Amino acid sequence: MSGEDDYMALLNRAKIACPETIENHERFEIPELDILQEGKITIFKNFIDVTDKLRRDPQHLLQFLLKELGAPGNIEGRRAVFKAKIGTPQINDKIQMYTETYVICSECGLPDTKMVKEDRTLMLECEACGARRPITVRKGVRVDNSNTLHEGDIIEVRITDVGKKGDGTSKYYDYLIIVPGTVKGASVHAKITKISAKTAFAVPTTEPCTR
């Protein structure tokens, strides 16, 4: 075999040995989140589809989300169920944070990585470029669902003023609550019927508070 034949044989063997991910330049995209609200429950319907794309253990991602979102939850089949009302943008932000921390290689920007334990340090090892780095978890701001209103919530408010149209007004955290048919100084149970930015419209009710 000539020197040129040897070179071509070695080149072909090298191509075969190269990981497919190096030749794959498709844009990495996380599946669009399919989120469903059922009362005070939030259902992440395609949770397993997301973990499959990220190539990560579903329990690892779930525990990350539960901690960051400050809500209890569990996996049911291919879904994740959170026992709190959580908006899609909030969940999406945490998925992005998880991806940047536990998936994307900081050197080549590819998702072709795996987590390995080195002594007591969790490392991210890239199968595409060979880079290795310790995983440093950023401290995010935990979502506090206690001060977030939703339509259907029933709260107790004290009417502190009356607007130009005669509607009673109050404050609930950073929301302005408008309750028609109430007078200044009254304490009422108010059922939220509509929310616009930080203004919430409500009606008096005899139902017990849900918040």
Image (cartoon, rainbow, N blue to C red):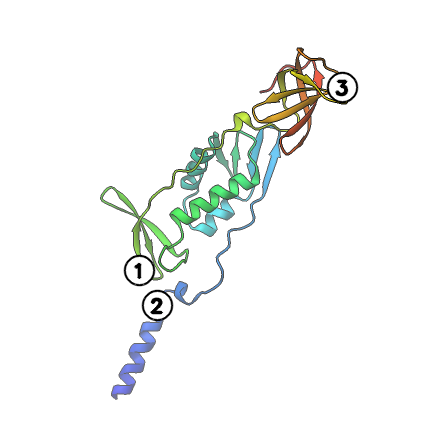
Q: CA distance from mark 2 to mark 3?
A: 74 Å
- Cβ–Cβ below 8 Å for labels 3 and 1? no
Q: Residue at the left extreme?
A: 119
Image quarter (top left, top right, bottom left or bottom right) of the C terminus:
top right
Chain-order first, disc 2 or disc 3: 2
Q: Please say whether residue 78 is visible from this viewpoint.
A: no
> Secondary structure under badge 2?
loop
* Residue type at tag 1: Gly
Q: Residues within 10 Å of mark 1 (few under 14, many from 20)?
A: few
Image quarter (top left, top right, bottom left or bottom right) of the N terminus:
bottom left
> Secondary structure under badge 3?
loop
Q: Residue at the right extreme?
A: 165
Q: Which residue is mark 1?
A: 130
* Residue type at tag 2: Cys
Choose between 175 and 165: the one closer to the eye.
165
> Secondary structure under badge 1?
loop
Q: For the residues carrying marks 3 and 1, which lies nearer the camera in this image? A: 3
Q: Residue at the bottom extreme?
A: 2
Q: CA distance from mark 1 to mark 2?
A: 12 Å
Q: Which residue is mark 3?
A: 166
Q: Is residue 182 above or below residue 115?
A: above
Residue 136 placement (x, y as % from top left): 33, 44
Chain-order first, disc 1 or disc 2: 2
Q: Which residue is mark 2?
A: 18
Choose between 118 and 108: the one closer to the eye.
108
* Residue type at tag 3: Gly
Q: Please say whether residue 68 is visible from this viewpoint.
A: yes
Quadrant of res 39: top right
Image check: 143 left or right of 186? left
Q: CA distance from mark 3 to mark 1?
A: 69 Å
Residue positioned 59% across, 22% down in the render = 172
